[in-house]
Image (cartoon, grey):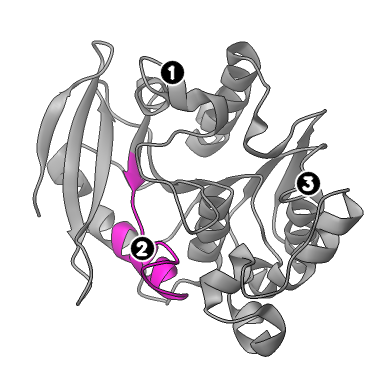
């Protein structure tokens, strides 16, 4: 375990930067940044960035919030939600399931070491945006029996059914791709139609079950890169299996919620934090 306090947030948050949580053989070490509130955290959240599985980093907050100061992570932590923002291998470095392996490694590290960073309690949550939302959903739905449990999940504009994504894009007025240059193809290492087995294995919608934790999906109605139908697909599968899932549509919102002002974005962040904190955060 490496890393240390890298300063404080807006007077109430301690930031532990560059904490190495995994050293995959043959790859770069993977790190996370952990934001801990001064008052006891009511939950711990593993946050996963977007970028189509091929770009992005743990320093990227969701949508317009990436430019905030204090940062999105500090503001969320100040509300009582300890935030661990983790990197994972991108598709140019390794293909699926490497990304899920990395996310599971981050979750396992946090389960073991959270107390040493001053994060008490047991409640553990996941929050991902776009590609990170896809990985957060897979973490919550597919973990091996011995893996740390996830108590609630927030997904912002996340792909959930890789086989249906291209058709959903076409129907939404975008342009779907299934060839080797598609984001999903680069993730699995082959054109989608050549590896239907991997497409299914990498799709959260394949793993909906009654024991799943509660999910909150936030999605823009004008998203053509990952249409809102993707959130609705997984929500419907979860509800059909007997689990709890809520979809809240952002009228006119595009992918990454670009175009939303800070006030509108802050409302979505606050809604997500309340959900992850559980009944006491409502």
- SS class, disc 1: loop
* 18 displayed left or right of 92: left
Q: Quadrant of the C terminus?
A: top right
| Tag shown at residue 89 | 2
Q: Which residue is mark 3?
A: 224
The disc, 3 or 1, on the residue closer to the chain's N-terminal end is: 1
Instruction: Reply yes or no: does residue 87 show up in magenta.
Output: yes
Residue that mark 1 sits on: 68
Query: Depth check: 63 or 140 in front?
Result: 63
Q: Please tell me whether residue 72 is drawn above or below residue 223 in the rendered image.
A: above
Which residues lie in the magenta part? 84-106
Tell me residue 42's x, y (percent). Answer: 37, 33
Q: Earlier in the sequence, mark 3 or mark 2?
A: 2
In the picture, measured across the screen, residue 107 lies left or right of residue 204, that is left
Front residue of this view, candidates 281 and 271: 271
Q: Earlier in the sequence, mark 2 or mark 1?
A: 1
Specify the quadrant that holds the N terminus.
Answer: bottom left
């Amino acid at each position: 375990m490496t890393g240390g306090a890298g300063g404080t947030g807006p007077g109430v948050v301690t930031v532990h930067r560059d904490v190495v949580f995994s050293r995959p053989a043959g790859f770069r070490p993977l790190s996370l940044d952990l934001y801990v509130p001064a008052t006891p955290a009511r939950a711990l959240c593993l946050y996963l960035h977007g970028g189509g599985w091929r770009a992005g980093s743990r320093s990227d907050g969701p949508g317009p919030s990436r430019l905030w100061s204090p940062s999105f992570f500090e503001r969320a932590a100040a509300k009582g939600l300890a935030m661990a923002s983790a990197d994972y291998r991108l598709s140019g470095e390794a293909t699926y399931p490497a990304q899920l392996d990395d996310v599971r490694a981050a979750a396992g590290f946090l389960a073991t070491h959270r107390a040493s960073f001053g994060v008490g309690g047991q409640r553990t949550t996941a929050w991902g945006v776009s590609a990170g939302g896809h990985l957060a959903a897979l973490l919550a739905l597919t973990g091996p029996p011995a893996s740390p449990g996830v108590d609630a999940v927030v997904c912002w504009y996340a792909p959930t059914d890789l086989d249906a994504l291209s058709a959903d894009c076409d129907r939404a007025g975008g342009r779907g791709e299934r060839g080797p240059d598609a984001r999903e193809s680069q993730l699995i290492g082959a054109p989608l139609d050549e590896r239907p087995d991997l497409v299914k294995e990498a799709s959260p919608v394949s793993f909906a079950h009654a024991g799943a934790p509660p999910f909150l999906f936030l999605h823009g109605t004008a998203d053509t890169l990952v249409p809102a139908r993707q959130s609705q697909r997984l929500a419907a599968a979860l509800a059909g299996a007997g689990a709890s899932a809520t979809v809240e549509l952002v009228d006119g919102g595009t992918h990454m919620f670009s175009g939303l002002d800070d006030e509108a974005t802050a409302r979505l962040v606050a809604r997500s934090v309340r959900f992850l904190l559980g009944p006491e955060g409502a």
